Amino acid sequence: MTFQLKSFALGFITACLLGLGSVFCLLYFGTSDTMVAHDQVLPSGKNIKITMCNFAWGVEHDERFPDKDCFVLEYVSSVPDADQHVKDQETVEVFELIRPTSELWGISKAEVLAFPSTRRKGSYDIYFFTRSSDEKWTSTRETAKVHIND
């Protein structure tokens, strides 16, 4: 068997070009701004997109805190440019989607994340809902920011 440098170089260059082309196609066609979402119509008639709903364990640094268990719902607001009061009202209505489940499981905390669009960029609101001993829910709001792509 004889070794031919010309054939080896041609094969190596072809393999490199195919590899680079594959990586390019994977990055170009494999990323998109669309995400899986469930369209949900609220009782008010607003149409939102639910992008995530989970049961979150109360665990921090391998320590278990059962009182921090909560349901977490993430959605895309139907009124991202409205004033804060309108967005707060919409979030309370969205919270009603997970409130019965939280109460059924005996969970006294819930979180609702309100994003302005399906693109994870910029600021969004996090609402922390807490049920008191008299069974009434209250909430507080914090603004957070996606830093990874800004």
Image (cartoon, grey):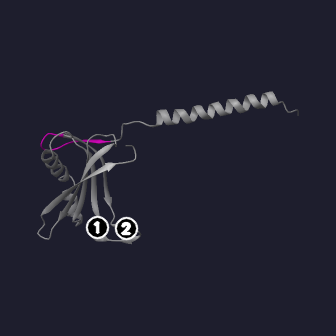
Q: How many marks?
A: 2
Q: Amino acid at mark 1?
A: Lys
Q: Residue at x 19, y 63 (%)?
A: 130
Contact flag, marks 1 and 2 (Cβ < 8 Å): yes
> How would you rate the neighbour count of disc 1 (Cα within 10 Å): few for under 14, some for 14-19, many for 20 or more?
some
Label number found at residue 68: 1
Left or right: 68 in relation to 139? right
Q: Residue at x 57, y 34 (%)?
A: 22
Judge by depth and name the residue closer to the eye, 149 or 89: 149
What quarter of the picture does the N terminus occupy? top right
Q: Position of residue 137 (x, y in %)?
A: 14, 61
Is residue 38 part of the magenta span, yes or no? yes
What quarter of the picture does the C terminus occupy? top left
Q: Amino acid at mark 2?
A: Glu
Lower position in the chain sequence, tag 1 or tag 2: 2
Is residue 102 part of the magenta span, yes or no? no
> How would you rate the neighbour count of disc 2 (Cα within 10 Å): few for under 14, some for 14-19, many for 20 or more?
few
Q: Which residue is mark 2?
A: 60
Q: Position of residue 66 (x, y in %)?
A: 30, 70
Query: In the rendered structure, which segment of residues is drawn in magenta?
Result: 37-46
Q: Is residue 89 above or below residue 8?
A: below
Left or right: 146 in relation to 76? right
